[in-house]
Image (cartoon, helix red, strand yellow):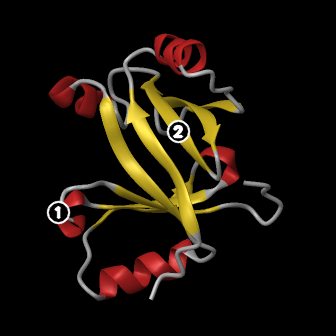
Amino acid sequence: MPKIAALDHIAIACPDLDVALAFWQQQLGLTCSHVEELPARGIKVAFLPVGDTRIELVAPLHDKSEVSKFLADRGGGIHHIALRTPTVDADVQEMADKGARIAQPPSPGAHDCRVAFVHPKSTGGVLLELSTPPANATH
């Protein structure tokens, strides 16, 4: 059984990261703690801590990115929910063995985390990310 440690973040797909950041910072007073480009995924992300969790804003770097189809089909909005676990590889394998549909196997993610995605068809309609931070992580 996966060892879920915490709600890591809620990801929001947005067409323009600067516009989205302006709202969250200027209207809600949140502070961006980290911005990172993930060229292999075609995305740029920004993290805004809220208590022990974070809001992750996700914007495409190009029209073939991971979020481009989502934005084209639905517009901006909640893209996925991420749960932190110390053992993403084992957890995803166990879930797949039990019949869960894995949308993306474990791979590198933001903050040097190892991430995997479980397909919404297995979760009741929500794209679920499992995330294992690096050993030296502070979040």
Residue at the limit of the structure toward the right, as seen here: 136
Answer with left or right where residue 64 lies relative to residue 51: left
What residue type is disc 1 on? Lys
**Viewport quadrant of the C terminus:** bottom right
The spot of residue 111 in percent (x, y) is: 68, 46
Q: Residue at x 63, y 74 (%)?
A: 86
Residue that numbered label 1 is attached to: 121
The front one of 75 and 96 is 75
Residue that numbered label 2 is attached to: 55
Answer with left or right where residue 98 lies relative to residue 135: left
Q: Residue at x 16, y 29 (%)?
A: 73
**Viewport quadrant of the N terminus:** bottom left
The spot of residue 71 in percent (x, y) is: 26, 26
Q: Residue at x 49, y 31 (%)?
A: 57
Ranked by sequence position, the earlier of labels 1 and 2 is 2
Answer with left or right where residue 41 lies relative to residue 117: right
Relative vertical location of residue 11 with respect to residue 33 in this rendering, above or below: below
The front one of 135 and 138 is 138
Numbered mark located on residue 10 in the image: none
Q: Point out the frontmost of discs 1 and 2.
A: 2
Q: Residue at x 21, y 69 (%)?
A: 122
Relative vertical location of residue 11 with respect to residue 124 in this rendering, above or below: above
Residue neighbourhood size for the residue with mark 1, other residues' Cα within 10 Å, grouped as few (<14), some (14–19), many (≥20):
few
At numbered mark 1, what does the secondary structure look like: helix, strand or loop?
Answer: helix
**Rendered image quadrant of residue 22:** top right
What residue type is disc 2 on? Ile
Relative vertical location of residue 87 with respect to residue 78 in this rendering, above or below: below
At numbered mark 2, what does the secondary structure look like: helix, strand or loop?
Answer: strand
The spot of residue 58 in percent (x, y) is: 46, 31
The front one of 66 and 120 is 120
Relative vertical location of residue 138 with respect to residue 124 in this rendering, above or below: above
Residue neighbourhood size for the residue with mark 2, other residues' Cα within 10 Å, grouped as few (<14), some (14–19), many (≥20):
some
